[in-house]
Image: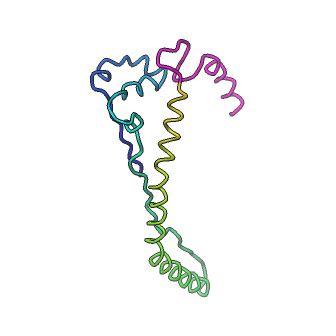
Amino acid sequence: SLRVRALFDEERLDHIVLDEVAKSMRCLVDCTEGVAAPPNMAIAVTELRVGLRPFLEINAFGALEKDIAGFANSLFSSLFKAYMPTVGVLTNGGLGLARWAINSMMWGDIARMAPCSEPGMLLGLHRESVDALPLVAVVVF
């Protein structure tokens, strides 16, 4: 699961022009100015977690094969029950420590975004990029 905090200035958000937001996400990010100190706390990943579940099951045909598969399933099930909580805690702890890196990367991308009022932008793309989209679509398909 991913939880993101986004704090916006209500007055700026009420007066935002949707056509400008479509030109650049920077217009929406500009609505966060002055609502948090430091500014990069206005939009931040606050929680990043995974839930681990044991999805391993072996099926087989034949009497002997079914017995072996049943033994293997019992063995794997016991290992999952014993070690899955520990692996989950370690994984989620690592993801919790990685939040600052994710937030730093996100704000680095935001800093490189085109300004809100830059002409010739469509959905954050320059006109040359938009003109190349049909060619890219043909090459991909």
Reply above or below: 89 against 68: above
Extent of the magenta region: 114-141
Left or right: residue 13 compared with residue 123: left
Residue 80 in picture, x, y percent from top left: 48, 75
Frontmost residue, 47 versus 61: 47
Residue projecting furthest to the right: 139
Split into 4 quadrants, where in the image is the C terminus? top right
Q: Is residue 134 magenta?
A: yes
Please indicate whether residue 96 sits to the left or right of residue 58 in the image.
left
Q: For the point 41% across and 48% down, which residue is it?
A: 2
Q: Is residue 81 above or below residue 107?
A: below
Q: In this orientation, which residue lies closer to the viewer: 46 or 1?
A: 46
Q: Position of residue 69 (x, y in %)?
A: 57, 81
**Magenta region includes residue 5:** no
Residue drawn where x is 43% and y is 52% of the image: 48
Give the residue furthest to the top: 119
Say above or below: 48 vs 119: below
Q: Is residue 115 left or right of residue 62?
A: left
Residue closest to the eye, 36 or 92: 36
Residue 15 rendering spot, x and y as whole percentages? 31, 17
Q: How many marks?
A: 0
Counting from the top left corner in percent of width and height, residue 63 is at: 59, 86
Given residues 135 and 97, the one toward you in this image is 97
